[in-house]
Amino acid sequence: MEAKQRILVVDDEPQLTRVLRRSLSTNGYDVRVAGDGDFALQTFRDWPAALVITDLAMPNMSGLELCRRLRSISEVPIIVLSVRGEEKTKVEALDAGADDYITKPFGMDELLARIRAALRRQPPADPGAHILEAGEFRIDLEAHTATQSGKDLRLTPKEFDLMVHLFRNAGKVLTHHSLLGAVWGGDFTEQTEYLRVFIGQLRKKIEMDPSNPRYILTEPWIGYRFNPE
Amino acid sequence: MEAKQRILVVDDEPQLTRVLRRSLSTNGYDVRVAGDGDFALQTFRDWPAALVITDLAMPNMSGLELCRRLRSISEVPIIVLSVRGEEKTKVEALDAGADDYITKPFGMDELLARIRAALRRQPPADPGAHILEAGEFRIDLEAHTATQSGKDLRLTPKEFDLMVHLFRNAGKVLTHHSLLGAVWGGDFTEQTEYLRVFIGQLRKKIEMDPSNPRYILTEPWIGYRFNPE
DNA sequence: CCATCTTTACGAATTTTTTATAAACCGCTT
DNA sequence: AAGCGGTTTATAAAAAATTCGTAAAGATGG
C-alpha cells in the first residue's frame, strides 16, 4: 500500500480550510491545516508535506514571506490562493517562490488538477512500487514477469492476470465470481470452467505436485485461495 | 555567459505570436514559433526547448494532444494559453501534462512570472543531452541521425522516433500500447500492425539476423524491449 | 517520380475457449 | 458405515481465436 501524499493547508479562514480539508482528504491526500505562517513553518519541519497550499493574506506572516521562508529550506511545491487578482500581486508571489497562483473563488476540480500537476513533476515515485513479493514468488507488473525462487514462470497473459489477482489477495478466499470478474471481465462471471482450466495450468507451473496443491488451494463451493507461505 | 533558454511558442494567431516573440526575446529568451502541433513536435525534436507555450485551439492537432505527445517524449514544462476558461477544459489540459493554464487575455508580466516559476524548478539544462549512447548505438537528436558502430543507419522519421523510444527505455519492456501512443499518438494505440511493420524494418537495419533478433527483443503478448548490450 | 507511411494478407506459433471424461465431494438413505 | 444421486472439481485434448513476422500492394506528400 502506497503512503498518502501529504498536503499542508495554510489559511486562517475556518470556512475555507474546512472545505479544503474535506475535499483533499476524500481525494486521497493526508491533510493538515496551519492557521498562520509561523505555525505552518513549524508544522512543515515536523511533518514534511509533499505540497503546500497557502493564502496570501494572513495574520502574523504574509503568504509572500512564507513562500520565501519555505523556499529557503525546501523545494516543496507551493500553490497560492488569493482573493487578490492584480497582476502585480501574482508576479510577487510567483517570484517569491510560489509554483502556482489561483484566484478565489476557484473550482475545486481545478485546484485538484493543479495539485496533480504540481505533484507530478516532483520526485519520481519510489522504484519497486510495481513489484509484488511474497514467499518465493515475485511479480514484476511493469516487466510483466513472474518468478518462483528466481526462475521465470513463463506465464501467458491470462495466467499472469490470474496470478496477480490471487497474489494481491494472498491468504484471502476469492470467489469464482470475483476472480472471473476481475480477470475476464463482468460478462464472464458464470464461466467457471475457464477458472478450472487456468487454475490447473497455473498449478502445473508452480506446484511441485499439481494434484496436491500447496500454494493455490481450492475452497470447495466457494473459490480459490493463494497461500504464498 | 550562460546560453539563452529556449522557449517554443505554439499558436496559429500571428497577432499573438508576434507579441509573444517580442516580449520573450527582450526578456532574454531564445524564441521559436510553430503554427500547429505537428510542426511543434518536429521543431521540438530538432531544437529541444526549455519550455513550451501552447494554445489549445489549433489546426491539425489540438493543444491537448500536443501536451500528451510532448509528455511522452520529454518533461519540458508546458504552459497552456486559452480563451476558454471553463473548469473542465483546464482540468483536461492539466491532466494531459500541462504545468500551467492561463486564460486569455492575460498580462505579459504574469506570463513572464509563470515562465520563471516553471523554469526555476526545472533542473538546469544539461548540454549534450541531445546525444544518446549505449552499446554500439548512438543517436543524435538534434542532427536526427542514428549510427551503429559509426555507420549511419539511415532511418526514416518514424523509424527514428521508434528507435528513440526504445532507446530511452533500454532494458525495459515497452507495451504495444505505450509505444504506439508515444510514436503515433493517442489515437493509434490499437494499431498494433504499424508496430509489427516498423519493428520489422528496424530489425532489418540493425540486426545481423533479423529473424533472430539480438537487440530488439519481442516480449510475447506484451510488447518489445531494446537491449543495447 | 520517389521515399515514406498505411493497409492488407497469410502462415506459423501460441494462447484461449470449448468440449469431454474422470475423479472428488456433499448430503442423504439404508 | 456403505452406497447412491447430484453437483463440483481436475485434467486432457480438440477447436477457435489471437499474435507475430513478413512481404507486398495501395496511398500520401513533396
Image (cartoon, coloured by chain):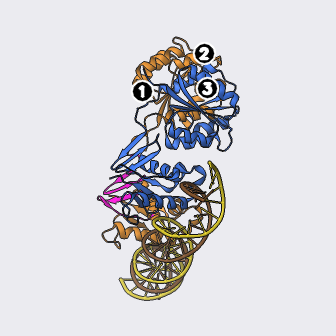
Chain colours: A orange, B blue, C brown, D yellow
Say above or below: B102 vs A157: above
Q: Is residue A172 visible?
A: no
Percent coordinates x, y for residue B219 in the rendering: 42, 60
Give the mark toward the camera: 2 or 3: 3
Query: What residue span does the magenta drawing correspond to?
Result: A128-156
- Asked whether the residues under the numbered discs 2 and 1 touch, taking CB atoms below 8 Å apart as contact, a structural biologist would say no
- Chain where mark 3 sits: B
The CA span between labels 2 and 3 is: 25 Å
- In-image side of B102 versus B5 (left or right): right
Q: Is residue A62 visible?
A: yes
Q: How many marks?
A: 3
In the image, are marks 2 and 3 on the same chain? no
**Amino acid type of the residue tagged 2 in the rendering:** Thr
Mark identifier at residue B21: 3
Mark 3 crowdedness (10 Å alpha carbons): few <14, some 14-19, many ≥20? some
At mark 2, the secondary structure is helix
**Amino acid type of the residue tagged 1 in the rendering:** Trp
- Position of the C terminus of chain A by quadrant: bottom left
Say which label, 2 or 1, has the lower sequence index. Answer: 1
**Which residue position is annotated with label 1?**
A47
Q: Nearer the viewer, residue A216 or C3?
A: C3
Give the mark toward the camera: 3 or 1: 3
Residue A150 part of the magenta segment: yes
In the image, are marks 2 and 1 on the same chain? yes
